[in-house]
Amino acid sequence: MYGLRDGHDDTGYCDTCAQAMIEDALRWRALVGCARVWVQGHAGLTPGSPYAPFEQPYAHVGVAFWTTFDYGQGVKHAAANPSAETEQGRRLLTTFADKAVQALSGRDSS
């Protein structure tokens, strides 16, 4: 089960936990570093959202990821050269992840 407290002390430090946190961080960087991050829909991730107020802990997001992507005519985007769409996707995904961390830890963002 995923969670922020999985039977370890509140410091979260032990060799196994430290290795797991490093692996999680590498996975996160790989995910948000994908060549294309395309948000198909979201709610609760931007101030003024009519469907789910940003200030509330609820949020959802639908995302498609490409590890590599060619826009045609030889125009390729990678982590170091993302499109504006991918930049927005990364921002929304990071906001979603921040809200998920709050929800898993039992903290309310409101």
Image: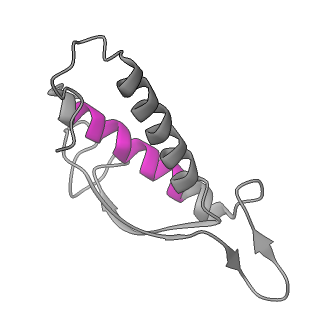
Image quadrant for the N terminus?
A: top left
For the stretch drawn in magenta, the main secondary structure is: helix
Magenta span includes 85: no
Is residue 47 visible to us here?
no
* Residue 36 position within the rendered picture, expressed as x and y whole percent measured from the top left: 60, 68
The quarter of the displayed image where residue 79 is located: bottom right
Image quadrant for the C terminus?
A: top left
Magenta span includes 101: yes
The one of 44 and 75 positioned closer to us in this rendering: 75
State the residue at coordinates (51%, 55%): 31
Task: Describe the colour scheme in one phrase.
Answer: one colour
* Residue 68 position within the rendered picture, expressed as x and y whole percent measured from the top left: 66, 72
State the residue at coordinates (18%, 29%): 6
Horizontal placement of 19 versus 10: left or right? right
The quarter of the displayed image where residue 84 is located: bottom right
Horizontal placement of 51 versus 14: left or right? left
The one of 43 and 21 positioned closer to us in this rendering: 21
Judged from this view, the residue extending furthest toward the front is: 15
- Position above or below: 105 against 36: above
State the residue at coordinates (21%, 13%): 9
The one of 18 and 76 positioned closer to us in this rendering: 18
- Position above or below: 90 against 57: below
- Position above or below: 6 against 84: above
Is residue 99 visible to us here?
yes
* Residue 109 position within the rendered picture, expressed as x and y whole percent measured from the top left: 23, 28
Please state the extent of the stretch shown in magenta in the rendering.
89-103
